[in-house]
Image (cartoon, rainbow, N blue to C red):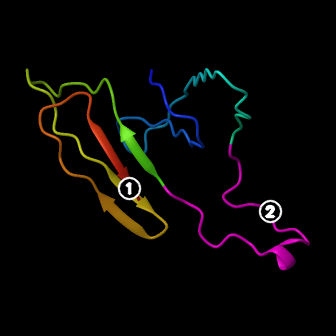
Amino acid sequence: RTDLKEGRYVIIPTTFEAGHLAEFLLRQFTDVPSDFQELTLDEPPRTCWSGICGYPQLVSQVHVISASGLKNQGSEEGVDPYVIIKCEGEKIRSQVLKDTLDPEFDVKG
């Protein structure tokens, strides 16, 4: 559970293992109406207005703020987590944060 500033967010539930599929229950609580909706398309639909008003060329940005509740991997100490973001053809890697189960990354890509 976390508190976020008012803004636009994309929430991406993931598993610990790459390629492993699982079901998720996602709950969202807000103080104001949020217009919360599932993103089902990779890009906005093209309409007759796209030729007049233009069409988005690049709109993706990923901002990893933090992680919480990471599990120890068989040792008494924390883990050494880091983040790799692959977005729009770029690859960004955060610093390795030593011995923590609740890292604060604040990295964008």
Residue shown at 61% from the left, 20% from the top: 29
For the residue pair 83 and 74, the one nearer the viewer reads as: 83
Q: Nearer the viewer, residue 14 or 18?
A: 14
User: Which residue is disc 2 drawn over?
Assistant: 45
Residue 1 among magenta residues: no
Q: Is 20 left, or right, of 30 in this rendering?
A: left
Q: Which residue is labeled 1 in the image?
A: 85
> At which x and y percent is residue 44?
75, 60
Q: What is the C-alpha distance between the residues marked 1 and 2?
A: 26 Å
For mark 1, give the secondary structure: strand
Q: Position of residue 21 (x, y in %)?
A: 49, 36
Q: Please tell me which residue is depicted at 43% across the width and 39% down the height of the picture.
A: 20
Amino acid type, residue under disc 1 in the picture? Ile
Q: Nearer the viewer, residue 31 or 101?
A: 31
Main secondary structure found in the magenta portion = loop
- Secondary structure, mark 2, is loop
Q: Is residue 60 magenta?
A: yes
Image quadrant containing the C terminus: bottom left
Magenta stretch bounds: 39-61
